Image (spheres, grey):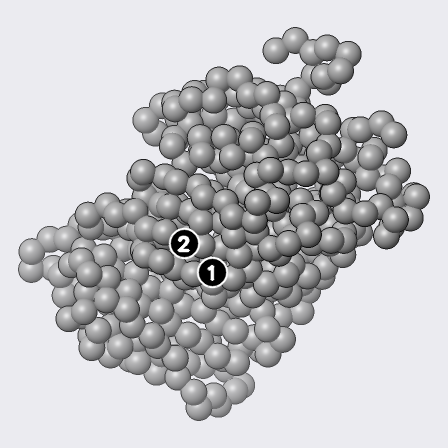
Amino acid sequence: MASTPQTPTPIHLDGTTLEGGGQLLRVALCLSSLTRKPIHISKIRGKRSGGGGLKAQHLTCVQWLGQASNANIDSAELKSKEITFIPSKIVEQFNSVLDAGDVRIKQSTPGSVNLVLQAILPYIIFSGVETPIRICIDGGTNVSNSPSIDYVIQVLIPMLELIGIPHIGIQIHSRGWSQGSATVGIVTYTISPMRERLSAFQLLNREEIVSVTATIIAPKDTERQFREELDVMFERRQSRFFGYAGDHDGGIDTTFEDSHHDKRYYLLLVATTSNGMKLGRDWLYNRGFRAGKLEQIIPTVVKKVSDDLLTEIEHGGCVDEHLRDQLVVFQALAKGRSKVYGGKRKDVLMEPSLHAKTAQWVAKEVLGVEFDDEGGCEGIGYLSHNVDKNDVTGDDVAKDLQSMNISS
């Protein structure tokens, strides 16, 4: 798309870069909407099977952020492999999408509600709106290869609070599943936008693990076997959870919920540290259900999830693999240098996941920020134009205008 004197040339992002999936699209749309910088994404989800392009969940994000930022969007339709997204340069004091206080986002399929949230959450948090926003999203709460609503409640939200984000309330009206018969659920998130810049945060010292919780969602008649498998696993591995030098008397605090389907098995394990950090790993079982082999599902799930969590614990990092990529946007938008320690294995720093590297790359392309090998980033100190500038210094306002590419 040709540029005009009023419209800078859109920042081009190749959708096959690094992870090459929906992460790139979600982060780019969010940052573009906030900073009013136009973007052009080609080869959308180019590394995905089935030809890539926009799926319904991605289109939902494009349309909502487009409406919120009054963007001019080209090629926003299902299966589109490229889009141009140009937010309006006119910064409105009244945002009709948010100031109403209640937002409804409907999906007719169990596309992950939490991936939609991932795309729009920073926009809402940094919108500068004065009152809490209730976002009701239809879709999947428990979807393969996506953050579950249980992980969001137990890991993501507490960790966001640790870095200075106001508490996000969640009400699960009904669950939506990708496994078993596909069902669409409904979740309401209550989000309080910030009225000031997010201060730089340091997640550098994890301290000791003090508790482990298990959340099981499975067929009702499997509850006893699940609990027994977890007890046996924990008895054998207790010293690895709490450290070889300790003699921890506790066990796993377990909750069970009926999944109401014989092909829905979900387990989340969360370790909490003495300074309130959370490490979580989970799995929605998505392998075959062969007759005569069903009794192996539960031990398989328990072993995989406990193995994954122990890997996170033993590398000493302050965040798990999946949380690390979700903090990238907040590091990039914070004021000052934020650092997130991802741990070491054999004295070598843990590399960020492809998802995290992708988010870092997008932040660099759109905002110009750099991430170092130790998880550090000097953020731009983003502040919404809906916030009263009398509360900040003139230098802060000038920096904000510059970072948003808007002249004063």
Q: Are marks 2 and 1 in contact (CB under 8 Å)?
A: yes
Asked whether residue 143 appears in the rendered view, the answer is no
Indicate the quadrant containing the N terminus: top left, top right, bottom left or bottom right: top right
Q: Amino acid at mark 1?
A: Ile
Q: CA distance from mark 2 to mark 1?
A: 7 Å
Indicate the quadrant containing the C terminus: top left, top right, bottom left or bottom right: top right
Compared to 21, does 245 lie above or below?
below
Which residue is tagged 1?
170
Where residue 230 sits in the image (x, y, percent)?
30, 75
Q: Amino acid at mark 2?
A: Val
Residue 231 lies left or right of residue 63; in this view the side is left
Residue 339 lies left or right of residue 26; in this view the side is right
Mark 1 neighbour class, 10 Å CA radius: few under 14, some 14 to 19, many 20 or more: some
- Residue at image position (63%, 23%) is 86
Going from the N terminus, do you reach mark 2 or mark 1 first?
1
- Residue at image position (41%, 36%) is 57
- Residue at image position (80%, 51%) is 336
Where residue 298 sits in the image (x, y, percent)?
23, 66
- Residue at image position (31%, 38%) is 108
Q: Quadrant of residue 207?
A: bottom right
Mark 2 neighbour class, 10 Å CA radius: few under 14, some 14 to 19, many 20 or more: many
Q: Secondary structure at mark 1?
A: strand
Asked whether residue 105 appears in the rendered view, the answer is yes
Which residue is tagged 2?
187
Residue 370 lies left or right of residue 50; in this view the side is right
Given residues 115 and 94, the one toward you in this image is: 94
Given residues 45 and 166, the one toward you in this image is: 166
Q: Secondary structure at mark 2?
A: strand
Where residue 368 sits in the image (x, y, percent)?
74, 34
Tally of marks: 2
